[in-house]
Image (cartoon, rainbow, N blue to C red):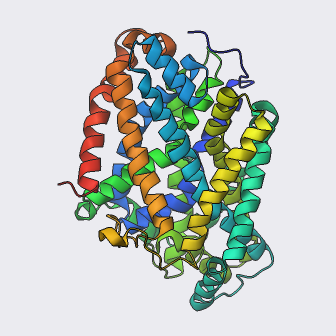
């Protein structure tokens, strides 16, 4: 199928940078270490890696293929493929859920966290963490999160950066940003890794990361591992469909997918290897949750020689990683607004950014003024299945990461495995019958749906 004549990535390298930039983000450096910490470390990590390659990667390859074949916005491409395969055009709704519920929904709280990260760049650079005690670090964190005005300010600033880059377009904005930022990101992360390996507590880290305790695994941890895999690979929210639609025909989809998944997983593991040695060396707890990098790490940074510099480098790294991801969260909505309403890119980016900003305010207020507000208490839901308090912020995070993403992945796998023409996928991937294509098709058709149904059901407490 000929895609609508439209912009394409200038080179394979530009695409890989953009896609890896999308995948590598807060998910790897902020979320992965604390979710692994909360779920007991190594057994969770092994399960996560299995999910990345057996479920996430097939879905990623499917999204790139549909995106490129459709050549439109995620919603448009899904519709085009459904049409080509004579499937029900309603499958395009999967794109609506991904683009709006997933992409913009995720961007709404992603940006709040990323704004927090940006504010810590200033804190770190001005030496606010030197010799900070555990109590002072807790207080500093509380001071930030309890002030709705400050949190909103940084959230807005981060959204504005995202909107400007996306507004400038694929070549002038996204590609330029990732070409400068990605090499810098790798440099900083390796620097931090070296520092941690040299000074941190490797023995405890190795024990924590590489000695599996299978008793820690249950339905809820499995669902977290799966949610983390999808979150980290940037699938099920339209991103990879959109990035796929800008791909030239001669680029191998399965090889690119494998490269993206491998790079993403390596960065998550490296982030763990950079963070936990410090956590253990300074006698801190690995299961601090989302505050791991905002409270625990500053304490470690505060005590080490050259800590202000290392801390600044760390939060700059995280800001960069967040920007190259947030632009990819906004892109599906922007592509859709342009296509559907004929909007200019700038207008589309501003509208998408404004939606994410407004929805993000619910997360902002759930940290302070509305922390006690439990919107689902009337139906007896004061706690989510993962044990978190059911305030607005946690509800949005849980709905996106543990429901929309896994359910979206499940429906996509069913669509591609059972309804999309096998031949057109084979043609798009440029592969002969058998071999790699056959493995991918078995995974997407049988393994992904079965595993997703099982994980979803057990994670949500169905059995
Ligand atoms: N993968 C990104 C991260 O790990 C988040 C993201 C999810 C980006 C979905 C785009 C789409 O931080």
Against 422, is 364 above or below? below
Give left or right: position of 321 versus 217.
Answer: right
Between 458 and 210, the residue placed more toward the observer is 458
How many numbered callouts?
0
Against 80, is 396 above or below? below
The answer to which image quadrant residue 27 occupies is bottom right
Quadrant in the picture for the N terminus: top right
- Residue 116 in the image, given as x and y percentages of width and height: 67, 68
Between 339 and 320, the residue placed more toward the observer is 339
Q: Say which residue appears at 71% left-offset and 26% top-offset.
A: 9
- Residue 420 in the image, given as x and y percentages of width and height: 39, 18
- Residue 36 in the image, given as x and y percentages of width and height: 42, 62
- Residue 115 in the image, given as x and y percentages of width and height: 69, 64
Q: Say which residue appears at 46% left-offset and 14% top-offset.
A: 83
Quadrant in the picture for the C terminus: bottom left
Q: Say which residue appears at 45% left-offset and 78% top-offset.
A: 285
């Amino acid at each position: 199928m000929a895609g609508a004549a439209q912009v394409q990535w200038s080179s394979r390298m530009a695409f890989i940078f953009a896609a890896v930039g999308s995948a590598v983000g807060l998910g790897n450096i902020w979320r992965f270490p604390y979710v692994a910490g909360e779920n007991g470390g190594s057994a969770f990590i092994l399960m996560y890696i299995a999910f990345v390659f057996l479920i996430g990667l097939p879905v990623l390859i499917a999204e790139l293929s549909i995106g490129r074949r459709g050549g439109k916005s995620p919603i448009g491409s899904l519709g085009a493929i459904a049409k080509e395969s004579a499937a029900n055009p309603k499958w395009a709704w999967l794109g609506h859920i991904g683009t709006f519920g997933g992409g913009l929904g995720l961007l709404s709280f992603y940006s709040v966290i990323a704004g927090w990260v940006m504010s810590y760049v200033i804190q770190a650079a001005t030496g606010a963490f030197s010799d900070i005690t555990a109590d002072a670090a807790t207080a500093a964190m509380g001071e930030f999160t309890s002030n709705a005005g400050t949190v909103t300010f940084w959230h807005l600033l981060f959204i504005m950066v995202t909107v400007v880059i996306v507004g400038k377009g694929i070549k002038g904005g996204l590609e330029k940003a990732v070409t400068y930022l990605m090499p810098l990101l790798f440099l900083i992360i390796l620097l931090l890794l070296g520092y941690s390996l040299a000074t941190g507590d490797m023995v405890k880290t190795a024990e924590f990361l590489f000695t599996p305790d299978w008793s820690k695994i249950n339905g809820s941890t499995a669902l977290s591992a799966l949610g983390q895999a999808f979150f980290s690979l940037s699938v099920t929210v339209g991103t990879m469909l959109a990035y796929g639609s800008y791909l030239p025909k001669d680029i191998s989809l399965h090889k690119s997918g494998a490269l993206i998944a491998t790079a993403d997983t390596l960065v998550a593991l490296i982030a763990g290897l950079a963070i936990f040695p410090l956590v253990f060396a300074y006698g801190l707890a690995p299961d601090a949750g989302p505050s791991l990098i905002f409270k625990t790490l500053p304490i470690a940074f505060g005590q080490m020689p050259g800590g202000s510099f290392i801390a600044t480098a760390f939060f700059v790294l995280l800001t960069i990683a967040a920007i190259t991801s947030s632009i990819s969260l906004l892109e599906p909505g922007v592509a859709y607004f342009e296509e559907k309403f004929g909007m200019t890119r700038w207008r589309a980016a501003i509208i998408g950014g404004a939606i994410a900003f407004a929805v993000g305010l619910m997360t902002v207020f759930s940290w302070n003024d509305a922390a006690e507000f439990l919107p689902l208490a009337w139906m007896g839901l004061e706690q989510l299945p993962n044990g978190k308090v059911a305030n607005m912020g946690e509800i949005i995070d849980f709905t996106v990461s543990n429901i929309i993403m896994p359910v979206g992945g499940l429906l996509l796998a069913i669509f591609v495995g059972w309804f999309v023409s096998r031949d057109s996928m084979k043609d798009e991937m440029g592969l002969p019958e058998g071999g790699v294509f056959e493995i991918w098709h078995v995974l997407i058709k049988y393994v992904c749906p079965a595993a997703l149904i099982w994980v979803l059901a057990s994670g949500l407490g169905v059995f």
